[in-house]
Image (cartoon, rainbow, N blue to C red):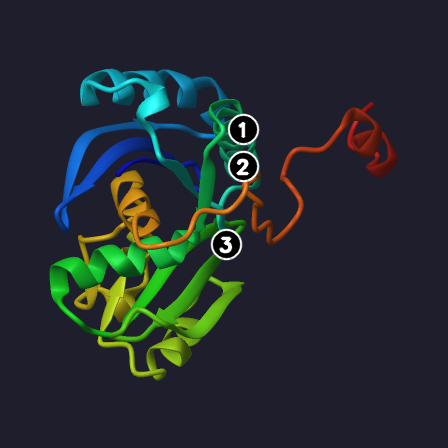
Amino acid sequence: MIVLGATTSTRRGGVAVVRSEGGAVETLALVEYEAADDHAEKLFHALDQAVTEAGIAKRDLARIACDVGPGSFTGIRAGTAALSAIAWSLGIGTVSVGSLEAMAFAARKELGDVSVLTLLDARRGEIFGAVYGANGVEVEPFHRARSDEAFVAGLRQTHAAAVVGEVATTLSLLTELARPVADLPSAAVIAEIALTREAAGAAILPAYVRAPDAKTIEERLRAGSLG
């Protein structure tokens, strides 16, 4: 089975093609890029490059997977819409993967079967955090809160043996616990997770947490932010 996975929920976008054969999982291609809120511009190029490097055609894909949040509203919207359209055009199913879940999966691959607290920058001085048990099951659903030590210390008490996430290094309380592994969601990991799940319909449903930062001109006029 060949699966394409993508991540667009953070500043690091990516597309990966993985293959499962005889129980072994092989990453055929991984293309990553840096994006602010311009995933829509870079995703298709990365997808075409990944398929080419993997030496396959899009029709060889069995399913498509994408992270659905939490994360950047505009990034998630761009990724889920684009990949849903591609899956529909190919007549294949999709798999939705949580951004924090993908980070926890990557951490357990490197650290072993340990419980993991995953942290992700939510912008505006906030962070997302969730705890996953050693078996990969979500123990504490994700929260969004102010980026401070008190919030993270509270989540740590939910028997989290490891703390991962790029944003963790900004919290002095976690300096020695923060791990370089799983700093952000990985497209290759998302594709690997998709190998273990049943595919759904072509539509990938985003898990939005809040409205986008961008506002229409009409909204800005009502708020008095335009002259």
* Side (left or right) of 180 relative to 68: left
The image shows residue 73, relative to residue 125, as above or below, that is above
Find out whether the residues at labels 1 and 3 contact each other: C-beta distance under 8 Å: no
**Amino acid on which the number 1 mark rests in the picture:** Trp
The location of residue 168, given as percent across then percent down, is 30, 59
- Numbered label attached to residue 202: 2
Numbered tag placed on residue 108 in the rendering: none
Image location (x, y in percent) of residue 165: 30, 56
Which residue is rendered at x = 36% and y = 21% of the image? Answer: 59
Mark 2 to mark 1 CA distance (whole Å): 5 Å
Q: Check disc 1: other Cα within 10 Å, few if <14, some if 14-19, many if 20+.
A: some
Quarter the C terminus occupies: top right
Q: Amino acid at mark 3?
A: Gly
Residue 125 numbered tag: 3
Q: Residue, x 43% and y 36% (percent of image)?
A: 8
- Sequence-earlier tag: 3 or 2: 3
Residue that lies at the very extreme toward the right in this rendered image: 222
Vertical placement of 117 versus 103: above or below?
below
Q: Is residue 11 above or below residue 183?
A: above
Picture coordinates of residue 66, whole percent (x, y): 42, 41
**Residue name at image x 13 percent, y 68 percent:** 112
Q: Amino acid at mark 2?
A: Ala
Q: Mark 3 against mark 2, which lies toward the viewer?
A: 2
The reply, left or right, for residue 107 in relation to residue 205 is left
* Residue under pointer 1: 88
Percent from the top left, x then y, of residue 202?
54, 37
Foreground: 23 or 83?
Answer: 23
- Name the quarter where the N terminus is drawn: top left
Which residue sits at x=37%, y=16%?
A: 45
Task: Tell me how far mark 3 sits from mark 2, CA to CA.
Answer: 35 Å
> Disc 2, disc 1: CB below 8 Å?
yes
